[in-house]
């Protein structure tokens, strides 16, 4: 649709009445410039966390359907409040939830994926000249039930809407003024990036940089959505996320920190074909995402497998493995929740020998022990003691500081 902009506002940006009014003015300014606007909102402040806590107050293992019924209310509150704020500024605005829009998603409660978005209602409202406010983070499954799309997934709602409506731009407004080389709240010397490729951003997001939801980046890449991340509190231009060919290649584009990891070690396995399959197949069927996998020599002829999962999914992963204990044939399950993951990302890394050793040197110099290493062409991940993550992130960032500049890439290429 011509002249359409999708703007998404995160929890901090809509945390209270004052912030909502501030956002409404930004939306209003965009509309007055002759744009059609779809606004996607997250739940206010820490509402989603509070709702999760409320559910835990009732039961430690809430039914996932009911948990989703509860969580979606956060975004719906924000959407209604935002529509009211826009109306108070004299605009014709309407709020819609996922059922009203027709955001169809898979059935996995808590981590559903968008399958299809119906556009009829949206275009109808937009053609009436209305500003449409959509509740982020939610979908409806084939049973007509509400599902949620994973923590932080309002970004994905916004990008998906921008894709189906063929918006000219999708702006993600948040509480930082762009994407930095590392989380600026943890490493204050982080550098803001003017532009980053979809691929590098996807690796950062998938490695734990919470600034953008990974599926939002994936979708933006697939549908070539013009994506910008910027601050809702200032006018400063943000960071553009683009196709790699249009972005100057840096050896290292960023560092991601993930504290939400848990490691599971499956010990005493036989050394024969099919063992890995017997472990990971039931986990995959349980829709569990498994990360860093390590196979090591255990005692005698035995093998140990270690892998990481999201902390919230550790219980479920252990449950699945215990149910399949006989088939897999392991001795023990050992879990560790005191780890954190530090990842350096950069498409230019493949041609830069020494990136890994530079990272290890930085960790050595600040006395941080590496528990596990995992590398690919575009990233290097280490697992370390969670208590040292800030120190380690600072040290690694300092070490790579020169590589974060364009000048470095140019001299290297010359
Ligand atoms: P929102 O509620 O608007 O979706 P989030 O909390 O999800 O906001 O994301 C913004 C936060 O992401 C920032 O406050 C920052 O602490 C964190 N962050 C992590 N990695 C980065 C990074 N590389 N660049 C900028 N912010 C980052
Ligand atoms: N409110 C949801 C969350 O806290 C979704 C989002 O903010 O994007 O995860
Ligand atoms: Mg977010």
Image (cartoon, rainbow, N blue to C red):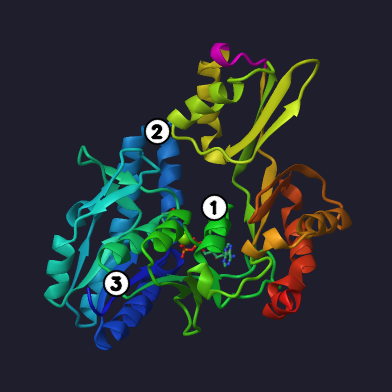
Mark 1 or mark 3: which comes first in sequence?
3
For the image shown, how many numbered marks are present on the structure? Answer: 3
Inter-mark Cα distance, 2 to 3: 38 Å
* 89 within the magenta span: no
**Residue at (59%, 75%) from the top-left corner?**
248
Q: 137 or 2, which is in the foreground?
A: 2
Image position, residue 164 (x, y; %): 26, 62
The quarter of the displayed image where residue 65 is located = top left
Contact (CB < 8 A) between labels 1 and 3? no
The quarter of the displayed image where residue 218 is located = bottom left
Left or right of 332, for residue 108: left
For marks 1 and 2, give the one nearer the viewer.
1
Task: State whether label 3 is within 8 Å of ligand 2.
Answer: no
Q: Which image quarter holds the C terminus?
A: bottom right
Instruction: Kindly identify which residue carries mark 3.
Output: 167
Inter-mark Cα distance, 1 to 2: 27 Å
**Residue at (28%, 88%) from the top-left corner?**
33
User: Which label is found at residue 62?
Assistant: 2
- Which structural element holds mark 2? loop
Instruction: Kindly identify which residue carries mark 1.
Output: 206
Q: Which residues are magenta?
A: 326-331
Label 2 CA crowd tier, 10 Å (few <14, some 14–19, many 20+): some
Residue 43 in sight here: no
Residue at the extreme bottom: 33
């Amino acid at each position: 649709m011509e002249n359409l902009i999708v703007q998404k506002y995160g929890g901090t940006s809509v945390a209270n009445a004052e912030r909502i009014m501030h956002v409404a003015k930004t939306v209003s300014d965009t509309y007055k410039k002759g744009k059609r606007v779809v606004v996607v909102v997250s739940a206010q402040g820490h509402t989603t966390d509070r709702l999760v806590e409320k559910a835990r107050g009732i039961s430690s293992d809430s039914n996932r359907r009911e948990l989703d019924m509860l969580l979606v209310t956060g975004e719906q509150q924000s959407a209604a409040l935002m529509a009211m704020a826009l109306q108070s500024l004299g605009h014709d605005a309407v709020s819609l939830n996922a059922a009203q829009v027709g955001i169809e998603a898979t059935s996995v409660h808590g981590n559903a994926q968008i399958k299809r978005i119906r556009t009829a209602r949206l275009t109808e409202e937009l053609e009436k000249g209305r500003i449409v406010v959509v509740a982020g983070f939610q979908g409806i499954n084939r049973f007509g039930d509400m599902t949620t799309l994973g923590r932080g997934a309002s970004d994905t709602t916004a990008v998906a809407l921008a894709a189906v409506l063929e918006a000219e731009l999708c702006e993600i407004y948040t509480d930082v003024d762009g994407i930095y080389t590392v989380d600026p709240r943890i490493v204050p010397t982080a550098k803001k990036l003017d532009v980053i490729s979809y691929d590098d951003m996807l690796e950062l997001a998938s490695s734990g940089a919470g600034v953008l939801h990974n599926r939002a980046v994936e979708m933006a890449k697939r549908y070539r959505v013009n994506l910008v991340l910027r601050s809702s509190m200032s006018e400063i231009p943000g960071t553009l996320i683009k196709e790699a060919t249009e972005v100057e290649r840096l050896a290292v584009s960023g560092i991601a920190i993930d504290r939400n990891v848990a490691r599971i070690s499956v010990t005493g396995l036989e050394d024969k074909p099919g063992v890995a399959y017997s472990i990971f197949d039931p986990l995959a069927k349980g829709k569990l995402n498994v990360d860093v996998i390590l196979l090591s020599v255990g005692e005698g002829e035995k093998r140990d497998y270690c892998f990481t999962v999201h902390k919230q999914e550790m219980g479920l992963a252990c449950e699945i493995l215990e149910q399949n204990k006989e088939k897999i044939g392991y001795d023990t399950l050992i879990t560790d929740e005191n780890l954190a993951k530090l990842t350096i990302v950069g498409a230019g890394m493949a041609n830069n020998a020494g990136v890994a050793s530079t990272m290890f040197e930085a960790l050595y110099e600040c006395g941080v022990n590496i528990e596990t290493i995992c590398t690919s062409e575009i990233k290097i991940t280490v697992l370390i003691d969670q208590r040292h993550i800030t120190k380690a992130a600072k040290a690694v960032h300092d070490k790579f500081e020169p590589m974060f500049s364009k000048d470095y890439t140019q001299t290297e290429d010359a």
